[in-house]
Image: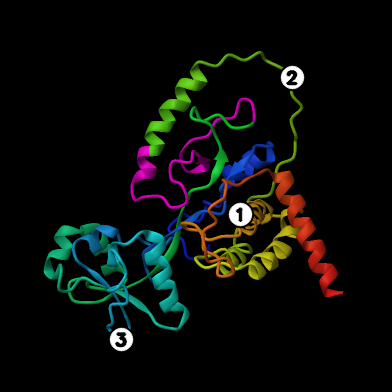
Amino acid sequence: FCDTTNPAGSWGHGLALAAWAGAELADLEFIQFHPTALDGPRRPMPLVSEAVRGEGAVLIDERGERFLADTPGGELAPRDVVARAIWHQLAVGRRVFLDARQSLGPRFGKRFPGIAELCRSAGIDPATDLIPVRPAAHYHMGGVAVDSAGRSSIEGLWACGEVACTGLHGANRLASNSLTEAAVTASWVAESVAGTSYTRRPRRCSTFVPPRPDASVVRPIVSAALGIIRDGEAMREAVATLLPIAANSVAASGPALVSLMIAAAALRREESRGAHCRSDFPLHDANVRPSRLTLHSAMRAAAALDCRATIRST
């Protein structure tokens, strides 16, 4: 994504490695956007924590109106709700600001020294100035499908942390739960690995060395089609663009492959749930199930979509 809190080198390589090995992946469509990243040129985008809103800071538009005042929970509503509300403001051309002047004022620097320093580096004094914010891609609830011991569908491959999909976060992670998950599931994985015995078997290994990954080509495609509000047409166009990149041995093929799998999963889920919001399917589906796919099934689905698009255009 162009707007992200993650380091530039973080493009989903763990998912790509697991997919290339044939592992099953789960719930890839669920990507959490943190609603209040500091709006500016810096990448990754710095976070302005929920704790600032917890201290009474409010979100306002450029007219000074508090647009979440009538929303249950207000500024402390779930992240997906707040992120969508900000997105709607940005979509009509209004900037969004976090206003901590009255709630914190001169106490801001002492209460949040790290955030205050980030603001100052951007030329903002949070005690007296409005803080410009916008949503940014922050966390992936989906990942390598694993059981309670962290075992994937591939023998000898375990996963834990953000690269894994344990199901603990559902469709919309609660703040700080990822740290708890990583600490607890890492222990479970270690116990499982230590208690597993293997017979060494000869395996054929590929000598192919992929090019150094470069996600710069993929980021604008993903940002346009797989952001906070999604629709089928934009995602199908993204699939058609990503498919030839993912199928070739170029620097962008790894990032394109991961993005293609996310798009395939998002297209399959014809409903809105948690962090996955589709304008063409705005309601929940009571009979929905967790999504599962492999590299093979994702590429097959993408090729079928691309084929149908070609037929329609001729």
Q: Position of residue 31 (x, y in %)?
A: 50, 55
SS state under label 1: helix
Q: Is residue 52 left or right of residue 171?
A: left
Q: Quadrant of the C terminus?
A: bottom right
Q: Which residues are magenta?
A: 154-180
The correct choice, above or below, for 160 with respect to 222 in the image is above
- Element at label 2: loop
Disc nearer the start of the sequence (2/1): 2
Residue at point 16%, 58% (across, down): 111
Q: Quadrant of residue 32?
A: bottom left
Disc 2 or 3, which lies upstream in sequence?
Answer: 3
- Determine which of the numbered discs, if any, sits on residue 63 in the image: 3
Q: Is residue 40 visible?
A: no
**Mark 3 belongs to which amino acid?**
Arg
Question: Given the image, on which type of amino acid does mark 1 rest?
Answer: Ile
Circle 2: is it few (<14), some (14-19), or many (20+) Cα within 10 Å?
Answer: few
In contact (CB < 8 Å): disc 2 and disc 3: no
Question: CA separation, marks 2 and 1?
Answer: 33 Å
In magenta stretch: residue 278: no
Q: Residue 127: percent from the left, percent from the top?
A: 17, 72
Tell whether label 1 touches label 3 (CB within 8 Å).
Answer: no
The reply to whether callout 2 and callout 1 are in contact (CB within 8 Å) is no
Give the class, few, some or many, for how many residues have Cα within 10 Å of label 3's Cα (few <14, many ≥20).
few
Residue type of the residue flagged with mark 2: Pro
Q: Residue at x 64, y 55 (%)?
A: 268
Q: Is residue 311 above or below residue 269?
A: below
Query: Looking at this view, is 85 or 134 the one in front?
Result: 85
Magenta-drawn stretch contains 174: yes
Residue sitting at x 20%, y 70%: 100
View extreme (front): residue: 286
Tell me the tag on residue 202: 2
Q: Which residue is mark 1?
A: 262
